[in-house]
Image (cartoon, rainbow, N blue to C red):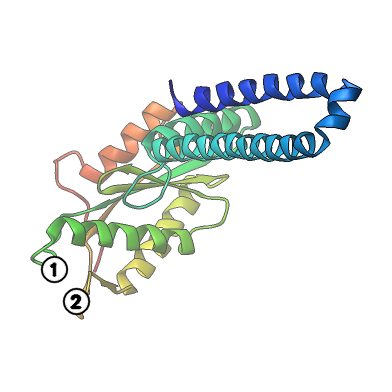
Amino acid sequence: MNQKNLLKYQLSLMGVILVAGLAASFNTEMRKEFFTVFVLFWLVLLSLYGFLFYQFLSFVRQSRKREEMLVQMGARDLVTGLMNRRVFEAIAGQEIERARRKEYPASLIFMRVEPIDPATKDFPQMAVRHLLFQIAEFLRKTCRNYDGIFAYDRETFVVLLSEVNADQLSMIAQRIEKKLAQKEFFIGLSNSAVKPRVNYGLSNFPAHGDDLKGIVQYGLKSVVGESGMMHRAKP
């Protein structure tokens, strides 16, 4: 029997005892003869019932918090805290359909962080995660409040921009690239600044595709390039 069912069973049992006690209270002779016992009985019984009811409500609240946490964990990238690829595909798909109906553009910026030689040699994985988290924080502060920022995969970010055409997209990407090049990142306890190498891929609806799949493929291809060489951001 799990905790929730146990609490339900205890509450039900206490309810039965309460009903029995209430029925006995209607007996005037017994109430007069055992008045003190009745008072103590009701005080103890009501206290126990209140305690059990409080425990049950606390358990329900904790269960809901756990469920919300699990839902959130399923929707967020654990390293950066950004919404993950699954959420991106759902939101971006809706945005593309809305852009199609209302005939306005929508754009994507893919940013892939190249592997680095971590400054913290003893904990390379932790160093990389720390760097990715800092880049995610940089994007949160740099992009517009209503732009969508997502962790597409382990080392790739994607920014969803509504009502941004192909010409505007290039200017925005250059602005992000310039600010990122000026930004210094520090890993762990290291005093040495790290300059991550970032490659960019741009795609726009409807210029580069008619649906989300086509736009994403174009954007990822522009990161990798037809020759298989990544387009490196200027340092």
Of mark 2 and mark 1, the one earlier in the sequence is 1
**The N terminus is located in which quarter?**
top left
Residue 206 in view: no
Image quadrant assignment for residue 119:
bottom left
Residue 229 in view: yes
Residues 16 and 168: in front is 16
Farthest-out residue, bottom = 191
Residues 155 and 73: in front is 73
Q: Which mark is residue 190?
A: 2
What residue is rendered at 57% in x and 25% in y? 10
Q: Mark 1: few, some, or many residues within 10 Å (few <14, many ≥20)?
A: some
Locate residue 38 relative to residue 27 in the image: left or right. left
**For the residue labelled by badge 2, is the local secondary structure a helix, a strand or a loop?**
loop
Locate residue 112 relative to residue 178 in the image: left or right. left
**The C terminus is located in which quarter?**
bottom left
Could you say where residue 79 lies in the image, as x and y percent from the top left? 31, 51
Answer whether labels 2 and 1 touch (C-beta < 8 Å). yes
Farthest-out residue, front = 33
**How many numbered circles are shown?**
2
Q: Amino acid at mark 2?
A: Ser
Q: Mark 2: few, some, or many residues within 10 Å (few <14, many ≥20)?
A: few
Residues 108 and 116: in front is 116
What residue is rendered at 34% in x and 67% in y? 180
**For the residue labelled by badge 1, is the local secondary structure a helix, a strand or a loop?**
loop
Could you say where residue 118 lies in the image, as x and y percent from the top left? 13, 64
Image vertical order of residue 27 relative to residue 79, above or below: above
Could you say where residue 40 lies in the image, as x and y percent from the top left? 74, 40
Q: Which mark is residue 227?
A: none
Task: Quickly name the residue at label 1.
Answer: 120
